[in-house]
Image (cartoon, helix red, strand yellow):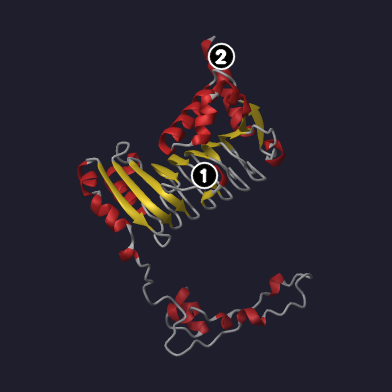
């Protein structure tokens, strides 16, 4: 059938057909009154390529993977990859180093699958400014510590690893008042942890599915389309927080009681953190982890007066998530009877 159509159009090979938009015709069946008078000639114009230029893919694209930093990371992790022997190393990093950790995580996944390696098997410290997608898809068992800052898509697709970001040693600025990672952090993450001593850009934790993270301030559209996991913000948030959020939990430190004006209530609601609850245990644990990993003075102040601080947190709970929890509680109560 294909050969028949090709013969009618005057083509011998499929490659000859690529780019031949001049063979397209508008159908009378779509001659809707709204489209009458439209001139589609520009859409079916066949440009003449320059000499030696093809209209279809005929050359392999050079991605420059041979220069990727991950080759060095993989080399240093040989013992860990072979028999899960713990390894540590330190590296300088520049903003031209992108998707650092992804190829390393691929090697781990090939041998150990989704479960990855035991916690902290590979511990790497980086100093400098990381490029886009630092720690993307980082596998379980890998811990990255970045002393510097990171660009957009930080921890994209985080898959079980741990990432800690702190300002460079000797910095004179207040971390909680300065951006240390870019936009769209934790996009689509499916596990792992992130502790950021500083603030993040916009769309923090967008489409997060399972990662747990603490950050000291974020821009607009935080927790957008989030479906799972837990995030804690111990600083200011931008507007439109929780838009499209259908799962997971967020805890917002709100000492000025102004967060409600920046919160999107379409799919989620605000609750208080109840003393002695599972929420308090989870929140307290994440704050303690954040302080231990980053040395955060903000977390230290909050933990130092916990009885007061607990009441200054708002819990963001999606309505769908809350309904499921209520149903499970009712089922458990019924089973107990």
From the viewer's side, name the closer residue of 67 and 43.
67
Helix, strand or loop status at disc 1: helix
- Residue 207 visible at all: no
Outermost residue, top direction? Answer: 337
User: Around disc 1, counting alpha carbons within 10 Å, would you say few (fewer than 14), some (14 to 19), or many (20 or more)?
Assistant: many
- Quadrant of the rendering where the C terminus is positioned: top right
- Which residue is painted at 50% across and 41% down in the image? 209
From the viewer's side, name the closer residue of 127 and 59.
127
316 above or below 90?
above
The percent position of residue 198, horizontal first and vertical second, equals: 51, 44
The percent position of residue 323, horizontal first and vertical second, equals: 62, 28
314 above or below 222?
above
260 above or below 185?
above
- Residue 4 visible at all: yes
324 above or below 200?
above
- Which residue is painted at 24% across and 51% down in the image? 76
The percent position of residue 69, horizontal first and vertical second, equals: 33, 58
Helix, strand or loop status at disc 2: helix
The percent position of residue 314, horizontal first and vertical second, equals: 62, 30
The image shows a total of numbered marks equal to 2
Query: Pointer 2: what residue?
Result: 334
Outermost residue, bottom direction? Answer: 51
Query: Pointer 1: what residue?
Result: 175
């Amino acid at each position: 059938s294909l050969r028949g159509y090709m013969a009618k159009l005057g083509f011998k090979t499929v490659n000859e057909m690529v780019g031949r938009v001049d063979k397209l015709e508008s159908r009378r069946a779509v001659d809707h009154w709204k489209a009458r008078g439209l001139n589609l000639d520009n859409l079916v114009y066949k440009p003449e390529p320059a000499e030696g230029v093809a209209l279809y893919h005929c050359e392999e694209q050079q991605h420059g993977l041979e220069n990727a930093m991950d080759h060095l990371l993989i080399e240093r992790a040989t013992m860990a990859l072979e028999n899960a022997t713990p390894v540590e190393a330190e590296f300088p990093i520049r903003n031209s180093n992108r998707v650092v950790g992804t190829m390393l995580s691929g090697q781990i996944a090939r041998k150990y699958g989704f479960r990855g390696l035991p916690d902290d098997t590979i511990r790497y410290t980086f100093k400098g400014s990381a490029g886009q997608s630092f720690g993307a898809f980082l596998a379980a068992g890998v811990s990255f510590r970045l002393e510097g800052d990171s660009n957009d898509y930080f921890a994209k697709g985080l898959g079980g690893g741990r990432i800690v970001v702190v300002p460079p040693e000797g910095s004179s600025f207040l971390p909680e008042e300065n951006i240390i990672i870019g936009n769209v952090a934790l996009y689509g993450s499916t596990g792992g942890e992130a502790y950021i001593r500083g603030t993040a850009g916009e769309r923090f934790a967008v489409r997060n599915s399972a990662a747990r993270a603490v950050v000291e301030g974020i821009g607009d559209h935080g927790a957008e389309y989030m479906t799972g996991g837990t995030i804690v913000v111990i600083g200011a948030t931008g507007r439109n927080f929780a838009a499209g959020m259908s799962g997971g939990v967020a805890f917002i430190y709100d000492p000025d009681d102004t967060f409600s004006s920046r919160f999107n209530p379409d799919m989620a609601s605000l609750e208080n953190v109840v003393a002695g609850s599972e929420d308090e245990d989870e929140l307290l644990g994440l704050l303690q982890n954040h302080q231990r990993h980053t040395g955060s003075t903000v977390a230290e102040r909050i933990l130092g007066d916990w009885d007061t601080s607990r009441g200054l947190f708002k819990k963001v709970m999606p309505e769908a998530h809350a309904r499921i929890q209520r149903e499970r509680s009712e089922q458990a109560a019924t089973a107990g009877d």
